Image (tube, helix red, strand yellow):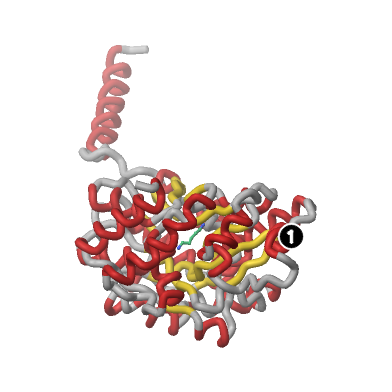
Amino acid sequence: MSGRRRSVLAAAAAALLGGVLAALPLVPPAPAAEERVVNIYNWSDYIDPKVLEAFTRETGIKVVYDTYDNNEILETKLLAGRSGYDIVVPSGPYLQRLIRAGAFLPLDKSKLKNLGNLWPEVTSRLAAYDPGNTYAVDYMWGTTGIGYNVAAVRERLGPNAPLNSWGVVLNPASANKLKECGIMMLDSPEDLIPSLLPVFGAKADSKRWDDLTLVTDALYKVRGAVRKFHSSEYIQALANGDICLAVGYSGDIMQAKRRAEEAKNGIDIAYVVPKEGALMWFDTFAIPKDAAHPAEALAFIDYMMRPDVAAANTNFVSYASGNLAAKKFVKPEILNNTGIYPDEATMQRLSINTAWDDRTQRFVTRLWTRVRTGR
Ligand code: N2P
């Protein structure tokens, strides 16, 4: 190769390299679409895993998914800040407290094209916690009641014992008869206290300390018959016959029933909203103020409000969806189950509760510690 030819080539190569360098951006390249991520913190046993897979397939957004089983854990993390989550699922009164504490971003509703699928009645009830529905949309709603292993309980209480009353667990003679076959209760004063207040003639939303104490005094008297206060273990324990009674959440008890049926172990589980009344609650999607991926969080919330997706979750977890348009995709056996979608008569017995102020919350924590630990 001649010297002249070589220098022409070198000049061309230098020009090419210069062009390439000039075209290189000074900032690092944006992450590829497949690196988009959303960090979700949701209740345990509360989603169809196939929905998460489909969301990633359809949007390219990876899901990192953690679970909890009571609102206090969530509240503590959010108040500490830097939770690392983009989506959380507080229940009404905790949503209310956390909104007051400035814990959430307002939802950019222009990004939520499926908002119109929500159930107006559920949305308006949620406004009691989130005025103007600014920060949250409903995911599921349900009740707190009693799950029975019907045969085991009837064997101990007699074939005609009425099971539709809180007396089954609050009456020490009755609770003691069930002690050996196993009682579990939610480790959740914000569910137990409002559910039981009507038994004592008080309103479920009473904030009077005397009223709150009536409930925890009654629980204190039967605490010796309770094997464990825990907010999620009862599903499997009921399903496999380790316990015969759980004070728990509607859908979780239905999941226990389904697990027993699938295992064909002969255990028949029933869920009851006691005649004295029970709590109706709402669990909502909200975006923490310091979320690193708010756009992905909105994409996730919008996806969850698609009627087919909302119905897939309800069909899987046996909780009523906050999505009215989803109803036509919900399996009839779930839609017609009044333990999941309460009928009018059951609705009449259901109450909602609002947040305790901080002083009352601390008082309740002390009352609850006494129930749990005996001290
Ligand atoms: C899901 C329990 C959610 C109900 N396992 C609590 N509000």
Percent from the top left, x then y, of residue 6? 31, 16
Q: Residue at x 39, y 44 (%)?
A: 32
In this rendering, position of residue 97 left or right of residue 66: left
**242 versus 338 height, above or below:** above
Question: Is residue 1 at all visible to an observer of this figure?
Answer: yes
Seen at 34% across and 62% down, the residue is: 286
Q: Residue at x 54, y 57 (%)?
A: 47
Position of residue 342 relative to residue 256, above or below, is below
* Residue nearest the observer in this picture, 223 or 282: 223
Q: Secondary structure at mark 1?
A: helix
- Whether residue 56 can be seen here: no
Q: Nearer the viewer, residue 63 or 188?
A: 188
Q: Amino acid at mark 1?
A: Glu
Is 13 placed left or right of 143 in the picture? left
Quarter containing the N terminus: top left
Q: Residue at x 29, y 50 (%)?
A: 76
Ligand 1 under 8 Å from disc 1 Cβ:
no
Q: Is 9 on the left-hand or right-hand side of 344?
A: left
Residue that badge 1 annotates: 155
45 lies left or right of 213: right
Q: Residues within 10 Å of mark 1 (few under 14, many from 20)?
A: few
Outermost residue to the front:
173
Counting from the top left corner in percent of width and height, residue 294 is at 31, 57
